[in-house]
Image (cartoon, grey):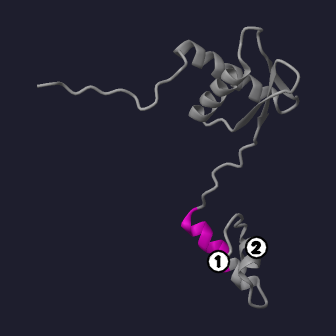
Amino acid sequence: MGKLRTEPKQKSFLTQDEYKALLNTLKDAQKAASDNHVYFDLESNEKPAQIKKSFNFVARKEGIDVTVRQVRGTRSLAFKFVKSRGNSRMSADESQARILKCLKTSKKPLKKRVFQLQLGIFGLRNS
């Protein structure tokens, strides 16, 4: 009878050392991004698409919200970091308090979209 063998669903195309180096570069770039435009200059033997893919892989795994793009006409990648808005979920108590406050302060019936805007609920589909 055979034996059970497991393998990761997605094999990493990076070694641990490469992963750590890319992570450190992303963290350094993130720190510098508050006051500067941040670029990563490629070596002549590096493929821009592969390096971009690697940075995106590490950023996704580490939860770093960044857009990596190749700068046209150069051998550089540009990083654009999105400022975190914190946790987008609110507690049930906070949600209830917002709804009650909105209802108490309105002087007339509210349309659904106006109600959503006053509560700070964006991106909901109108049904």
Residue 122 image offset from top left, x and y in percent: 72, 65
Q: Disc 1 or disc 2, which is closer to the eye?
A: 1
Whole-percent x and y of residue 54?
A: 63, 24
Magenta highlight on residue 97: yes
Q: Main secondary structure of the magenta part?
A: helix
Dividing the picture into quarters, in which one does residue 92 lie?
A: bottom right
Q: What residue type is labelled 2?
A: Gln
Across and down, in percent, residue 123 comes to: 70, 64
What residue range appears in magenta? 91-100
Which secondary structure lies at badge 1?
loop
Residue matched to label 2: 118
Marking on residue 127: 1
Q: In which quarter of the image is residue 53?
A: top right
Question: Separation of disc 1 and disc 2 at Cα?
Answer: 18 Å
The crowd level at tag 2 (other Cα within 10 Å; few <14, some 14-19, many 20+) is few
Residue located at (64% from left, 77% from top): 127
What quarter of the picture does the N terminus occupy? top left
Q: Which amino acid does label 1 sit on?
A: Ser
Say which mark, if any, is on residue 54: none
Q: Please name the residue shown 70% across and 24% down the image.
A: 49
Q: In this view, does 75 lie to the left or right of 86?
A: right
